[in-house]
Amino acid sequence: MTDIVALAEANQRKAREVIAKLRVVEAWEAVGAEAHLVGSLRTGLLMKHRDIDFHIYSSPFRLSDSFAAMAALVADPAVKRFEGANLLHTPEACVEWHLWYDDGGEEWQVDMIHLVKGSRYDGYFERVAERIEAVITPRQRETVLRLKYETPDDEKIMGIEYYLAVIRDGIADYPAFVQWRKQQPADRIIEWIP
């Protein structure tokens, strides 16, 4: 297990280096927004899937600010591609941005969700991360990291699925996790706070 923990810690250090090199927080602050780290890096549960998640807030919300921050970010030649989705007129009330950053041959995906303050998910995923950090035991942390490590690289699984399976339902190995997932509704935002 020590090797898996060491790998996770190394990848988390690299993720933080990518954030600093890309100047994610600074790009959003330059347009008056706040960038909050969420997801597996925030909880210390990033394993081998090179994905960094931010929720961004600004008041008032201006689409032009969102584009200005992204223009600054994608000007970096290490950003190889990016995409966005306008979800302002949905219950999510956000603009989703995704970019792919080449860090010396390793591709990192940076997901930045620019939310309208006061909308349904304002602060929600920050609270999820805080609760996971507060309740997860060392054994559960190791189990989550092992499950993530054993997940095939081409399999797309949301981090919250691992946390729900391990923390709430006591899943302890990958075969049981695969069976657990088959019994869960697919393609949805999982609203669960431990």
Image: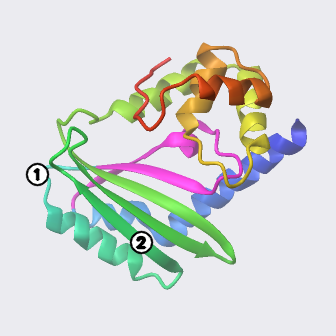
Give the residue drawn at x 44%, y 22%: 192
* Image disc number at residue 147: none
Give the residue drawn at x 57%, y 45%: 41
The answer to whether residue 141 is magenta is: no
Position above or below: 99 against 167: below
Q: Which residues are magenta?
A: 32-56
Determine the residue located farthest toward the front in the rendered image. Answer: 182
Give the residue drawn at x 18%, y 50%: 88
Give the left or right position of residue 112, taking residue 10 as reference: left
Question: Exactly how many numbered labels are in the figure?
Answer: 2
Give the residue drawn at x 65%, y 49%: 155
- The residue beneath circle 1 is 60
Between discs 1 and 2, the one toward the N terminus: 1
Question: Which one is in front, 8 or 89?
Answer: 89
Question: Which one is in front, 39 or 187?
Answer: 187
List x then y, in percent, for residue 65: 19, 65
Give the left or right position of residue 105, taking residue 110 as reference: right
Question: Which one is in front, 112 or 173?
Answer: 173
Asked which quadrant contains residue 10, the reply is: bottom right
Determine the residue located farthest toward the bottom in the rendered image. Answer: 77
Give the left or right position of residue 186, taking residue 34 as reference: right
Amino acid bearing label 1: Pro
List x then y, in percent, for residue 120: 23, 32
List x then y, in percent, for residue 54: 42, 50
Question: Which one is in front, 112 or 96?
Answer: 96
Position above or below: 169 against 153: above
- The residue beneath circle 2 is 82
| Distance from the alpha carbon under mark 1 to that under mark 2 | 25 Å
Asked which quadrant contains residue 97, the reply is: bottom left
